[in-house]
Image (cartoon, rainbow, N blue to C red):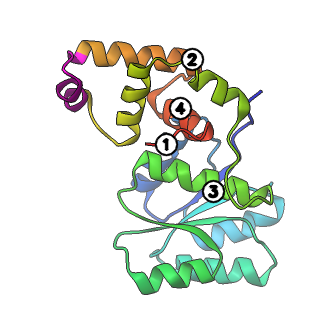
Amino acid sequence: MSRTPTRVYVVDDDPLLRAAIVQLLEQSGYTAPTFASGEAFLRALPKLPPGCIIVDLVMRGMSGFGMQRRLLACGCRWPVIVLTGHVDRANAERAVQAGAVSFLEKPVRLVELVAAILKGEAYLLGAREAIPDPELIRRVGLLTPREQEILRGILHGKINKEMAAEFGITESAVKGYRLKAMKKLRARTPAELVMLALRAGFHA
């Protein structure tokens, strides 16, 4: 039986970005409570169950780095995924040194976000890397070679038109293969299809 996705906390002072991230996460099967500031998250922290934390680097008031420091100071070692509008090597190294498991540039791609969360889940479980789910591996094994090609294209972020041209088939055929892959993996949405594929260890 596949594992229940871990809880993910989204901390960002931009309501539109919070909503966009939550939509992606909920479509992928995650529960994603949101917080408009680092201060608000820290106030709620004592009553929250363990999970992954997604935090924007630059926010009004407490920054993402500031929140990371406060988490470390209070002994919280939950995995942190840092989002930034511009990837800077120095900031990335600083975030990792403060305990971040991933440092992602906005706008973040679904496959990158889910991969980072799976890495965080592994951290919570005491593993170095995400452990593929045996049941999902079995389901992926039910995919035909063409369905696997379409799934790989989805993970690469390709649209139906691109895959149709690449494989010499119609866009309707691409949609058909995608729907068959969703059925076999028991995914309710395309976003959940990506999440389940990554949980199975299927990579682009």
Q: Nearer the viewer, mark 3 or mark 4?
A: 3
Mark 4 vs 2: CB contact within 8 A:
no
User: Label 2 is placed on what type of residue?
Assistant: Leu
The alpha-carbon separation of the residues under discs 4 and 1 comes to: 15 Å
Identify the element where label 2 is drawn.
Answer: loop
101 falls in the magenta region: no
Asked whether residue 8 appears in the rendered view, the answer is yes
Q: Which mark is residue 119?
A: 3
Q: Badge 3: few (under 14), some or many (20 or more) residues near its Cα, within 10 Å?
A: many
User: Label 1 is placed on what type of residue?
Assistant: His
Q: Which residues are magenta?
A: 161-171
Identify the residue position indicated by label 2 in the image. 142
Quadrant assignment for the N terminus: top right
Asked whether residue 62 appears in the rendered view, the answer is no
Q: Position of residue 68 (x, y in %)?
A: 64, 78
Q: Which mark is residue 203?
A: 1
Q: In terms of sequence position, does the residue under pointer 4 or pointer 2 come before the other?
A: 2
Mark 1 vs 3: CB contact within 8 A:
no
Q: Nearer the viewer, mark 3 or mark 2?
A: 2
Q: Position of residue 14 (x, y in %)?
A: 43, 61
User: Label 3 is placed on what type of residue?
Assistant: Lys
Q: Residue furthest toward the front? A: 145
The alpha-carbon separation of the residues under discs 3 and 2 comes to: 25 Å
Which residue is at 82% across, 59% downward?
A: 47
Which residue is at 81% across, 77% downward?
A: 75
Q: Nearer the viewer, mark 4 or mark 1?
A: 1
Q: Badge 4: few (under 14), some or many (20 or more) residues near its Cα, within 10 Å?
A: many
User: Label 4 is placed on what type of residue?
Assistant: Glu
Q: In terms of sequence position, does the residue under pointer 2 or pointer 1 come before the other?
A: 2
Q: Nearer the viewer, mark 1 or mark 3?
A: 1
